[in-house]
Amino acid sequence: MSKTATTVEDQINEALELIRPAIQMDGGDIQLEGIEGGTVTVRLFGTCESCPISPVTLKHGVERLLKERIEGVTEVVAIES
């Protein structure tokens, strides 16, 4: 992570920026909603809301990336818009 990402929230937002272009290419978007313990809550927008493979993107893309880059992240869950 960059030296400017000092808080866990900053680190998560920075990591989401890495995956955001791929999500946007498919007509969706992602936003951090909250952090509680090791659980990161995000909101999916656009085509991601109704996409049948969004759970795969969430677990194998977003969650994997955040776990690799940010100590303490244990899971990522999405909330309904």
Image: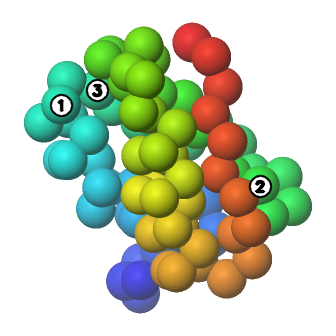
- The residue furthest left is 25
Query: Tag 1, which secondary structure?
Result: loop
2 versus 37 height, above or below: below
Q: Position of residue 62 (x, y in %)?
A: 46, 56
- The residue furthest bottom is 3
Residue receiving disc 3: 28
Q: Position of residue 36 (x, y in %)?
A: 84, 52
Query: Tag 3, which secondary structure?
Result: strand
Whether residue 58 appears in this view of the structure is: yes
Query: Tag 2, which secondary structure?
Result: strand
Quadrant of the drawing holding the N terminus: bottom left
Instruction: Indicate left or right for 70 with 71 as reference.
Output: left
- Looking at the image, which residue is at 55% across and 60% down? 63
Q: Are the residues flagged by discs 3 and 1 in contact, CB closer than 8 Å? A: yes
Instruction: Indicate left or right for 62 with 77 as reference.
Output: left
Q: Quadrant of residue 77?
A: top right
Q: Earlier in the sequence, mark 1 or mark 2?
A: 1
- Looking at the image, which residue is at 41% across and 33% down? 53
- Looking at the image, which residue is at 86% across and 61% down? 37
Residue type highlighted by circle 2: Thr
Residue type highlighted by circle 1: Asp
**Closer to us: mark 1 or mark 2?**
1
Q: Quadrant of residue 18?
A: bottom left
Residue type highlighted by circle 3: Gly
Q: Position of residue 66 (x, y in %)?
A: 53, 68
Q: Earlier in the sequence, mark 3 or mark 2?
A: 3
Q: CA distance from mark 3 to mark 2?
A: 22 Å
Residue receiving disc 1: 26
Instruction: Indicate left or right for 73 with 58 as reference.
Output: right
- Looking at the image, which residue is at 41% across and 58% down? 61
Residue receiving disc 2: 39
Label 2 Cα crowd, 10 Å radius (few <14 / some 14-19 / many 20+) = some
